C-alpha cells in the first residue's frame, strides 16, 4: 500500500481545490485560514438546503476566486470524476486541496474514490472543527444504513468470515450502539475522539456510556481529532491486521476526520466495507459555527 502522510508545504500550487458550500457558517472558515492557490477552485452546493448561512458562504467563495456549482447527489460522482480526469491530463501525478469539514460522507467517499482509483496524487486536507453545541437527546432515525458506495462495499472480501466492526464514536444519543445491534458483529473496535473542546469529549462519553461498559478497554482506541496522520497510523495497521481473519466493516461515525480516514482505509483495502448511517430526509438543518481549531495535513498516494 503506497499511502503516506506528510507535512503540508506552504505556497503549494494545486491543480484542483474543492470545498463544500453548505448552510453552516463553518463552511467558509477555510477562506479565513488558508490562502488557496489552485488552477481550478470549485465550491459545491447540494442543490437544496440553501438556507441559514448558505448565501453568505456562496458570496465568500465567489469573492475568493472559486466557481460555485450546485450539484445534486445523483450527479456529484460523475462531476468529481470528470474534474479529476481533467486535472490529470498530461500529468503523472496531481496536487489537490480538499476541505473535508462540511462534505457529507457520501460525497467524501466519491472524492476519495475518484482520486485513488485513477492514479498518484498529493492531497492537502483541511479540517475545521465545529464549535460545541449540545447534542439532541432523541435517538437518531436513519434513512440509510448501508455501504457508502458499490466500490466501498467490500465485495471482494470472503463472505464466510466472521464480521468485525471498527467504528468511530460521535455524540449522537445511542447511535453507535443501535448500529452495532443491527449488524451484530463477532467483535467490535471503537475509536474515541479526543477533542480540544472538552465539552465534546464529555458528550461522547455520556452518549456512549452503555456501549463503552460493554466493550473491552483494549478494544477502545483514542485519537486526537486535529491530527489526521496520527489517526491514520492507528487505523490503517489495525484494519490491515483484522482483514486477514475477519470480514471488516468500517462505520465512520463521529468527527469528519475519522470518516475521511476510514474512507482512505476502505480504498486502500478493497475487501473492507465502509458503511454510512444517514438521517437523509429526517435530518434537520443546524448551523455550526467554527471553533477556531483547524488543521491541515498531506496525503501522498504513489
Image (tube, rainbow, N blue to C red):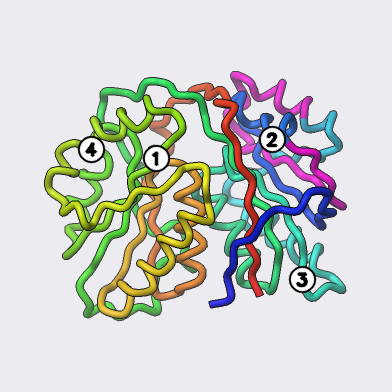
Identify the mark nearer the N-term, 3 or 4.
Answer: 3
| Quadrant of the rendering where the C terminus is positioned | bottom right
Q: Check disc 4 and report the residue beneath it.
A: 208
User: Secondary structure beneath disc 3?
Assistant: loop
Q: Is residue 55 magenta?
A: yes
The tag on residue 194 is 1
Q: Residue at x 46, y 50 (%)?
A: 259
The tag on residue 93 is 3
Nearer the observer: mark 3 or 1; the answer is 1
Identify the mark nearer the N-term, 1 or 4.
Answer: 1
On screen, 257 above or below 135? Answer: below
Q: Check disc 2 and report the residue beneath it.
A: 30
Within 10 angstroms of label 1, few (less than 14), some, or many (20 or more) residues? some
Identify the mark nearer the N-term, 2 or 3.
Answer: 2
Q: Nearer the viewer, residue 181 or 229?
A: 229
Q: Nearer the viewer, residue 34 or 82?
A: 34
Are the two marked residues, 3 and 4, in contact with CB atoms closer than 8 angstroms? no
Q: Nearer the viewer, residue 125 or 272?
A: 125
Identify the mark nearer the N-term, 4 or 2.
Answer: 2
User: How far, Cα to Cα, is label 1 from label 4?
Assistant: 14 Å
Looking at the rendering, the stretch of residues picked out in magenta corresponds to 34-60
Q: Is residue 147 magenta?
A: no
Q: Position of residue 217 (x, y in %)?
A: 19, 52
Q: Position of residue 10 (x, y in %)?
A: 79, 49
Q: Position of residue 269 (x, y in %)?
A: 45, 73
Amino acid at each position: 500500500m503506497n499511502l503516506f502522510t506528510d507535512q503540508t508545504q506552504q505556497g503549494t500550487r494545486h491543480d484542483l481545490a474543492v470545498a463544500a458550500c453548505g448552510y453552516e457558517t463553518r463552511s467558509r472558515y477555510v477562506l479565513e485560514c488558508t490562502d488557496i492557490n489552485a488552477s481550478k477552485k470549485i465550491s459545491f452546493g447540494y442543490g437544496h438546503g440553501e438556507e441559514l448561512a448558505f448565501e453568505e458562504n456562496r458570496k465568500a467563495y465567489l469573492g475568493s476566486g472559486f466557481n460555485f456549482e450546485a450539484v445534486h447527489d445523483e450527479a456529484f460522482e460523475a462531476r468529481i470524476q470528470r474534474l479529476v480526469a481533467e486535472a490529470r491530463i498530461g500529468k503523472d501525478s496531481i496536487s489537490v486541496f480538499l476541505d473535508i469539514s462540511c462534505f457529507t460522507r457520501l460525497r467524501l467517499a466519491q472524492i476519495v474514490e475518484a482520486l485513488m482509483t485513477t492514479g498518484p496524487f498529493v492531497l492537502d486536507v483541511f479540517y475545521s472543527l465545529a464549535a460545541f453545541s449540545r447534542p439532541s437527546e432523541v435517538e437518531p432515525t436513519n434513512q440509510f444504513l448501508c455501504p457508502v458506495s458499490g466500490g466501498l462495499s467490500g465485495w471482494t472480501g470472503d463472505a464466510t468470515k466472521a464480521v468485525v466492526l471498527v467504528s468511530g464514536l460521535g455524540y449522537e444519543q445511542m447511535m453507535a450502539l443501535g448500529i452495532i445491534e443491527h449488524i451484530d458483529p463477532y467483535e467490535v473496535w471503537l475509536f474515541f475522539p479526543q477533542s480540544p473542546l472538552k465539552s465534546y469529549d464529555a458528550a461522547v462519553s455520556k452518549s456512549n456510556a452503555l456501549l463503552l461498559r460493554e466493550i473491552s478497554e483494549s478494544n477502545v482506541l483514542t485519537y486526537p481529532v486535529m491530527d489526521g496522520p496520527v489517526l491514520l497510523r492507528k487505523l490503517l495497521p489495525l484494519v490491515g491486521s483484522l482483514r486477514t481473519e475477519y470480514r471488516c466493516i468500517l462505520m465512520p461515525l463521529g468527527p469528519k476526520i475519522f470518516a475521511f480516514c476510514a474512507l482512505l482505509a476502505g480504498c486502500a483495502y478493497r475487501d473492507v466495507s465502509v458503511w454510512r448511517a444517514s438521517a437523509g430526509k429526517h435530518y434537520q438543518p443546524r448551523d455550526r459555527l467554527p471553533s477556531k481549531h483547524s488543521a491541515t495535513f498531506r496525503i501522498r498516494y504513489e
